[in-house]
Amino acid sequence: MVVKKQQKSERIKRAVNIATKAHEGQFRKTGEPYIVHPLAVQKILEEWGMDEDTVIAGILHDTVEDTDLTLDDIKKEFGESVAFLVDGVTKLSTARNGMRDIDTYLPATKDNFLRLMIALGDDIRVLIIKLADRLHNLRTLSALPPDKQKKIAKESLEVFAPLADRLNMGRLRVEMADLAFKYVDPRRFEELEKLIKKHNKSAEKSLKKIEDEVSAALKKEKIKFTISGRVKSVYSLHKKLAKHNQNINEIYDLTALRIIVDDITDCYLTLGVIHSLYTPMDGRIKDYIAMPKQNGYQSLHTTVITKDKRVVEFQIRTKEMHEYAERGLAASFYYNEQKVTENYKKGKIEHLPTNLLWIRELQTTAARLREGKKIDLKKLKLNLFADKIFVYTPKGDIIDLPAGSLPLDFAYRLHTEIGDHVVGVKINGKMSNLNKKLEQGDIVEILTSKNQTPKESWLGKIITSHARQKLRNRLHKNK
């Protein structure tokens, strides 16, 4: 779906002028004036169809951190919403800058950093601005020295591409991952790129024949549809091959045909038509419409064997599902949300599994925002980790724990040996006790002694099942 181009509003023009003036005299590593970057972020956000406040915040996203412009200045000029978004992006940057290189993290911390980003991104739009910012940085990565290229690319693969996936922004995830992988492992990237091109060339005629056969059958059933090929991305193939011992013959979705229809009924009718033409492979039919992925992705997938023994995957979905699969939550800000909005008015929001309710809530709020209605900023808060707190080791590693956790929970999360020998704890540099609940952002230092052994009384000083199990195992061994 192509977003209609809108005339630049006076507010957006004003934001461009203010940002240009604020960044005057600053330059990027490419040698270009710095304003090129915020304007590129603006363009990306407009392509994603984001609302005006988000676009303006994208233009101004680096001003508070890098220029003399203040949040109060932004609030006076553009209102509370824009200031809130710029503040959110600034906080994410500050959190990132205060952390060490990703290679030095504890193994679990890479995932925790992703969680931290989501937890700190109080408004979904903050994360979308951050992703637009990172996408442009990746597109211009060649201007940086090799060590910086690899560092940024590695972080993009391990944090930002998964974040795009968490928000189901499929098109962004693919571009970001491939751009980054090209710098992380250029030789492997080139090798796989050639492999994909070779495979596609050999499969081209066969796929065209299959496409024609399916098209004729769907027209006969009077199903309205569009059909197109979908080529697997380089990084996706790299990950798939790792799972299948580098055996490309076990990769069935290297190329796929995607069919987009008008409604859910047509999805299942189309699946039936395909299975009447070709033999479906056992265990390769996936119904993500009835059981969506956790990020809200919906589609029917089936892998079939054609008469000439070629293996082909089909993806079948509605237009709305496709737009969401491509753009994820960003799509909610411009896609036709009338159904959601009408249901909202009638109090008939469709039932979703608990883990997907946050998606419906955000879509509903986005629909109201598109209608120009006032919204409560708290409605766009991501509560994905509302029951989690993030605390730090003295070295800056992040550990996520359930809210209400105590120092012994933290100690056992680090390592069983540390937990078993705890003699004390420092929280934010001050001696504390083992009954003190940890709070968001605490720096926790565990003090140990080889002479210390676990005590049964400790069971009353932990809340996590992980720590409880480790402690019980040790107490049992010591009997």
Image (cartoon, rainbow, N blue to C red):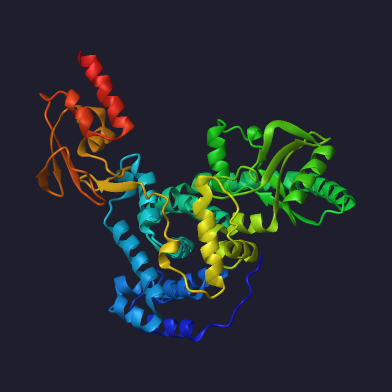
Task: Report x, y in % for residue 2.
Answer: 65, 68
The residue shown at (57%, 54%) is 170
State the residue lying farthest toward the right: 220
Establish if 30 lies above or below 149. below
Which residue occupies the foreground of this view, 424 or 176? 424
> Horizontal placement of 17 versus 187: left or right?
left
Quadrant housing residue 203: top right
Establish if 412 lies above or below 141. above
Task: Report x, y in % for residue 177.
Answer: 50, 52
The tally of labels here is 0
The residue shown at (26%, 51%) is 440
> Horizontal placement of 475 versus 338: left or right?
left
Quadrant housing residue 5: bottom right
Which residue occupies the foreground of this view, 56 or 407? 407
Task: Report x, y in % for residue 84.
Answer: 37, 70
Establish if 21 lies above or below 413. below
Which residue occupies the foreground of this view, 289 or 413? 289
Establish if 350 lies above or below 73. above
Residue 354: tell me if it is visible. Answer: yes
Q: Quadrant of the C terminus?
A: top left
Residue 134: tell me if it is visible. Answer: no
State the residue lying farthest toward the front: 346
> Horizontal placement of 257 versus 110: left or right?
right
Quadrant housing residue 288: top right
Task: Report x, y in % for residue 381.
Answer: 42, 60
> Horizontal placement of 238 versus 204: left or right?
left
Q: Quadrant of the N terminus?
A: bottom right
The residue shown at (57%, 32%) is 244
Which residue occupies the foreground of this view, 367 or 448? 367
